[in-house]
Amino acid sequence: MQEILNDPLLQGFFHDFINQQITLATGAVWLLIAIAFSIIGGALGGVILAGKDLGLRLSAMIGGLYGPAAIIPAATLGLALIAFGLA
C-alpha cells in the first residue's frame, strides 16, 4: 500500500485534484463524477415525473439513461473552458 501511495504519478494526481487544477486525468475523474450524479438525478427525476404512469423501475431506468445525455457534453465543454483559461 505504501508503494502505491508513494508513487510520484499518484501523488501528482492527488495534488492536482485537491488544488483544483484541470489536467487530462483530473478532468476524466471530474467527468466520471458528473456522469454518476447525472445518472442518479435522472433516475430520481424519472421516478418523480413518470413513476405512476410507467412504474417506478422503468421510469428510473429511462431517467438514468437520459440523465447523462445533457450532462456529458456540458461537463466536457465546461472542463475544457476551465482548463484553457477561458472561463
Image: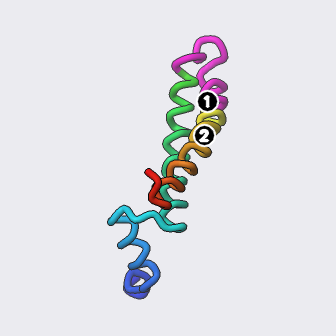
What x and y, as percent, mark residue 82? 46, 55
**Residue 55 sits inside the magenta stretch:** yes
Q: Residue at x 47, y 54 (%)?
A: 86
Give 59 or 21, whichever is nearer the viewer. Answer: 21
Indicate the amino acid at tag 2: Pro
| Earlier-in-chain disc, 1 versus 2 | 1
Indicate the amino acid at tag 1: Gly
Mark 2 — residue? Answer: 68
Q: Quadrant of residue 2?
A: bottom left
Q: Residue at x 43, y 73 (%)?
A: 13
Residue range highlighted in magenta? 48-62
Determine the residue located farthest toward the left in the rendered image: 19
What x and y, as percent, mark residue 14? 38, 71
Mark 1 — residue? Answer: 63
Q: Which mark, residue 31?
A: none
Instruction: Identify the secondary structure beneath mark 2.
Output: helix
Determine the residue located farthest toward the front in the rendered image: 86
Q: Residue at x 42, y 85 (%)?
A: 8
Query: Relative to 86, does residue 54 appear above or below in the rendering?
Result: above
What x and y, as percent, mark residue 10? 44, 78
Q: Residue at x 61, y 45 (%)?
A: 73
Which SS does the magenta portion mostly show? helix
Q: Judge from the rendering whether residue 31 lies leftward or rightward of residue 54; answer left or right.
A: left
**Where's the N terminus, which quadrant?**
bottom left
